[in-house]
Amino acid sequence: MKVTEQDVAYVADLANLELTDEERAGMLRDLNSILDYVDLLNELDTSDVPPMAQVSDRYGVDDAKQGSERFAYASREDVLEGLRKSLPHGVALENAPDADGDFFRVPKVIER
Amino acid sequence: MDLTSLTIDAARSAVQKRETTALALAEAHYARIQKEDGQIGAFLTLSKERALEQADRMDRMAAEGKTLPPLGGVPVGIKDVMSTRGLRTTAGSKILEKYIPPYDCTAVARMEAAGAVVLGKMNCDEFAMGSSNENSAYHPVRNPRDLNRVPGGSSGGSAAAVAADMAVVTLGSDTGGSIRQPASFCGVVGMVPTYGRVSRYGLIAFASSLDHIGPLAKTVKDAAIVLRTIAGRDPMDSTSADVAVPDYVAELDKPIRGMKLGVAKEYFGEGLDDEVRQAVETAIEKLKELGCEIVPVSLPHTRYAIPTYYLIATAEASANLARFDGVRYSHRARGVKTLSEMYRRSRDEGFGAEVKRRIMLGTYALSAGYYDAYYLKAQKVRTLLTRDFDEAFRKVDAIVTPTSPTAAFRLGEKSNDPLAMYLADIYTVTADLAGIPGISVPCGETKKTLPIGLQILGKHFDESTILRVAHAYEQATA
């Protein structure tokens, strides 16, 4: 599969990366070489093979149940008296590049 | 007593018996860091205040005649991808240069609850992406065994510190081999537990279905002690397994005579350096002498492991790294006028080349029109790779392989060819994909005296078996 300059621009857009022209050229080269290599996977017939998203499903999924009940192993009890303790507000803002004491502050969201 | 060449038990016991103090131990390690780390670069941040407070706590316990916890007074290092409350955590990246986590990684909390003295945060490849520690945004780490060579990666700092006696044990993370490969390059023990054995809460995520936390140590027993300390269900990580933690240390000396060890031909083919092959084959002979039965097995899909890994890991990374947007805790670009510009420029300024490359590859693999051909395909091959191990483990108790096709390469040797760097992970990525445990132990040296590692892979949640085999081998070749 061949990656084009347009593809690189499109993907950089999706990934929220502002690449310089030099970076774009390097990316074009690297992506193509890596994608050429991963084409190796097409040697395999996987039409009857289920995908494996993660290992932990092997150890907790209850196949006797339906829907989200199958994954009960991954959930925990709601703590009823108040919520489970979360970060205090002030602490959560401590690493903010810009905050006003209540909110994280960012440049305008809606462009006119 | 040389305070910087002790194992966990020796250090703890010395503090308990008041032959030395936790304070003296910490200071001796800091002195060594002061002397050696300028050349090696293993540490990114030192945590003297935190270390000395903990050391003091342990010394007071010992003075009162109380029994110290299992890591009481033991100086340790924590890879900088694990959050430490109040102590700068960078993930080896400039985007988190000033980040001070408000909470502790569970594994770190468990180490400290067991008395460990955290000396500082270990240098690593940026966001754990790399096999040589050359991708750290700060400075590379040099191999203590040969300063012109890499220590391996991404837990290069963690491995180098143990190898150079700048810490007794360290915690590292392993997503494609990042604990085992640097352990093998630096001549120390490194272990990746079963996926879910150790909580990932507080580990800055790279690839959530592949990330693992594990120990790097001077001996197999020390690795077992650390594993016993950090393993176990954590309600804060829903992928952490509700499986009982055996006493790995108590089981270590159980005899291995009669165990069946698999040797897979796919791990001994082209690309394997001759000296590494020789050392590993000699090690296998030794295991035979110790009474193990060597059984040929096949893991036929091994050659597809690297492409599978680099599609899954990068796809997951592209999602996990989306949170670094300049809003809440990371670097924010200056002079930006819109939100969109802020996101793009902050990320472009804050991320290094390898990280950007992997985000791009992962985003591409997940994008509309390509998802089926790349990500989904890779997930299917992951099933096939895991089945290979399931099949093999029907016949054998563990599988022995080289940890890496070569010994440590020179700094700069592979950094211009990303693909060549990726291929260095050939023997380690399979374990992460299948979620099985693995351990690397030193098994000799090249003619240039570079360390070589023997890898032992085990069944899910059977860390005991691989620890026993590794321990028996280590003791027989001490």
Image: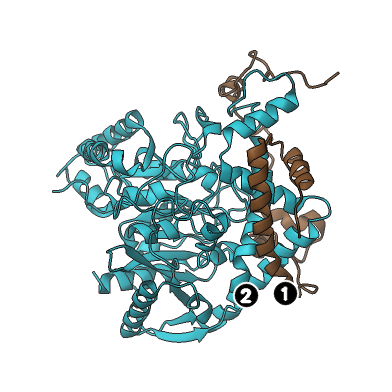
Q: Is residue B290 visible?
A: yes
Task: Say few, some or many: other residues with alpha carbon within 10 Å of mark 1 (under 14 / 14 to 19 / 20 or more).
Answer: few
Residue beneath label 2, please?
B301
Q: Name the residue: 38% across, 72% down.
A: B276
Q: Quadrant of residue A9?
A: top right
Q: Is residue B422 above or below residue B329?
A: below
Residue B374 location (% of width, % of height):
74, 60
Q: Name the residue: 63% across, 50% down.
A: B238
How far, Cα to Cα, is label 1 from label 2? Answer: 9 Å
Q: Are marks 1 and 2 in contact (CB under 8 Å)?
A: yes
Q: Is residue B437 above or below residue B314?
A: below
Between B24 and B71, the one nearer to me in the picture: B24
Name the colour assigned to chain B in the rendering: cyan
Residue beneath label 1, please?
A44
Question: Residue B146 vs residue B3: left or right?
Answer: right
Residue B36 location (% of width, % of height):
26, 42
Chain containing mark 1: A
Colour setup of the view:
by chain
Q: Amino acid at mark 2?
A: His
Between B196 and B246, the one nearer to me in the picture: B196
Q: Quadrant of residue A92?
A: top right
